[in-house]
Every structure is written in C-alpha cells, then in structure tokens.
Amino acid sequence: MTCPAHELLARWDTQQSAYIAHREARFNVVLDTLSLLYGDDFQVLDLGCGPGSFSQRLLNRFPQVRVTALDLDPLLLAIARQALEGQQDRIRFIHADMSEPGWVTALPDTPRAIVSSTAIHWLMPEQQAVLYRTLRELLAPGGILLNADHQRFSPHHPQQKQLAEAHDKLTQQQAFAAGAQSWDSWFADASACETLQAQLPERARLFAGRPVPPATTVGFQLALLQQAGFFETGTLWQYLDDYVIAGWK
C-alpha cells in the first residue's frame, strides 16, 4: 500500500504520546531553551532523529536554523526524508550509528546545539559514556546538549518508581482507548508501505542481536555528562521520571 510520509509522521507522534504523557511540553522546553540561548539562527544536530518529529519542530520554530538529522534506522530515516522534503535547503540527513567510532566524520558542520529525544537510552551505559565525550568534543564553544528522555527511578526510590509506572500505564490505556496506535501496530503499517519495504532487510540486519540496555537514573546520566567534561549540567524539566537534561560546553 502507499503511505504519505507526513501521515506516518503524524501517526508516529500520536503513538509516541501514548508512551510519553507530556511529549509536546518536553519538546517545547528544549525549543524555548534554544530560543533564549541562540535566537533563531544556529546549527543543530538532531541525534537519533527517527522519522523527523524533533527536526520538524525545529524547522517550524526557527526560520534560520540549519538541522542535521542523524539516525541508524533506515526506515525511520526514509520517512523523515519524505516528510520534510519541502525543507531540503535547511536540513541534511545522515545515516550513521552513534554507538560506533567515527560517526562524527559524516557530519557537515559543527553544531551549536545537539538535541535528542527518546534515543540515547537505546545505547548501553558504556556506549553512552563514550557518546557524551564525543558530543562535548563535537559542540562549538558555548554550545549545549539537550537530552529529552525517560530516566527511570531506581529500586532505592520505590514509591516514586511505583507512581511513575502507574502513570505510564494509565497514559497508555487512555491513549489507546482514544485511538492511538501502539508501537507494534504503527511499525506493522509502516512496514507494509511500498515506498519503505526496500529498507526492511537493512533494518533487520542493523538491529539483529542488539542487546536491550538497562534503565538508568537521572543521577547516572548527569554523572556521565560531568565525567565527559561538560562544565555545567542539570535538569531543565521533569515530570515524574521524564526529563530534559542539559550539558554546557
């Protein structure tokens, strides 16, 4: 079947909101931070861009921004290319694996800002440590890394952990009852699209045998940023176990 990319992206946003209760608010915290720091004219790397949700919002919010959108998943990247084709003069797409050495050589420019949403947690903790060091080196002086993602509560905080898990369950129940797709349902539909089926064998090869990383806490993430050499780190936004964390170079 044929599937307009902008419709797949819109349905992606809806299904992701089933798993991230205040996803749009989380995006807006990052966008507002960038606006306060850099106005509307800067270079930004969207790390783990998926089908283009964050890149789309960056392009819509900042008329002078230049975006580099990077992802490993060829299917999601193909959707992003198609959905944002009207902005080709302001966005470049890179197919690369941020867990592998040397991926930065594919980048066309030095970013003033690096943003990521629901992506870095797919790396193993030791890979995250290496990545953060690489990102600090990559950033322009005065640049910032902004990571929007869940950082789970540890068993040492059982009440907060239980509350966050109950809230996640309720959010999903309400979203699915209102018609949102699950990840599995959305991916099945995307995989059936004629324009995307050519990406499936490569996607299967790239993700075969990849381990599922353990959940980490926000304290662990901030410690990694500090160890990577970011001179200031902190939490800019939190809703239960969902965060926007920052590191300044």
Image (cartoon, rainbow, N blue to C red):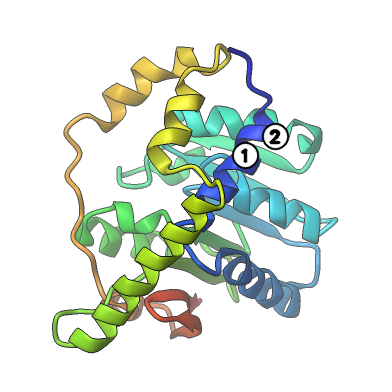
Q: In the picture provided, is 9 more to the left or to the right than 172?
A: right
Residue plotted at (32% across, 58% down): 121
- Residue corresponding to mark 1: 9
Residue plotted at (16% across, 33% down): 209
Give the quadrant of residue 243. bottom left
> With respect to residue 125, does 219 lie above or below?
below
Residue 216, x across and y down, in percent: 24, 70
Residue 198, x across and y down, in percent: 47, 12
Seen from the viewer's position, the closer of residues 61 and 248 is 61
Q: Is residue 228 visible?
A: no
- Sort mark 2 into few (<14), some (14-19) or many (20+) by Cα contacts within 10 Å: some
Query: The residue under label 2 is which amino acid type?
Result: His
Q: CA distance from mark 1 to mark 2?
A: 5 Å
Q: Is residue 50 visible?
A: yes
Query: The residue under label 1 is which amino acid type?
Result: Leu
Quarter of the image that includes the N terminus: top right
> With respect to residue 249, does 187 lie above or below?
above
Seen from the viewer's position, the closer of residues 2 and 201 is 2
- Residue corresponding to mark 2: 6
Residue plotted at (53% across, 47% down): 180
Judged from the image, the secondary structure of the residue bearing numbered disc 1 is helix
Q: Are marks 1 and 2 in contact (CB under 8 Å)?
A: yes
Residue plotted at (63% across, 75% down): 29
